[in-house]
Image (tube, rainbow, N blue to C red):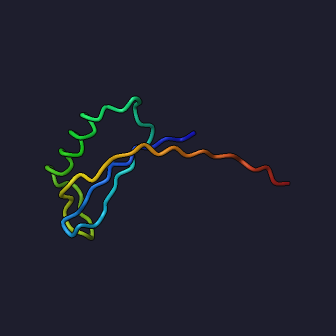
Amino acid sequence: MAKTLELQFNTRDNKPFSITLTDPVEPVNTAAIAAAMDAIIMQNCFTTSGGDVVAKKGARIIERNENDIIIG
């Protein structure tokens, strides 16, 4: 089962912007996630079509199951 951490933001034009990170550390440290998101906003290190990233929207762990199908 593959897991990713998705950091969700809003841009200046109120459009969604997200960053996905593979293999998150669990259990999650919500304070560390919030601090990292604040640092991303303060450093203004991403440019989007909706303008600068200006606000935290949320974060979530996404789990994905993959099952190979044998064809032949």
- 37 shown above or below 25: below
Question: Which residue is painted at 23% across and 45% down in the image?
Answer: 37
The picture places residue 49, in percent across and down from the top left corner, at 27, 70
In the rendered image of this protein, does residue 51 appear above or below residue 66? below
Query: In the drawing, does residue 59 fall left or right of residue 54?
Result: right
The number of numbered discs placed on residues in the rendered structure image is: 0
Query: Farthest right residue?
Result: 72
Quarter where residue 32 is shown: top left
* Residue 64 in the figure: left or right of residue 53: right
* 26, 40: nearer the viewer: 26
Residue at 31 percent across and 60 percent down: it is 17
Above or below, 28 relative to 39: above
Specify the quadrant of the image occupied by residue 35: top left
Name the residue nearer the viewer: 16 or 71: 16
User: On the picture, is 69 further left or further right than 8?
Assistant: right
Where residue 5 appears, x then y in whole percent? 40, 43
Query: On the image, which quarter does residue 14 sit in?
Result: bottom left
Image coords of residue 43 (percent x, y)? 15, 50
Left or right placement of residue 50 versus residue 67 in this view: left
For this orientation, the residue located farthest to the top is 27
Quadrant into which the C terminus falls: bottom right
The residue depicted at 34 percent of the width and 55 percent of the height is: 18
Q: Position of residue 2 (x, y in %)?
A: 54, 41
Quadrant of the frame with the N terminus: top right
Q: Residue at x 36, y 32 (%)?
A: 28
Residue lying at the far left of the rendered structure: 42
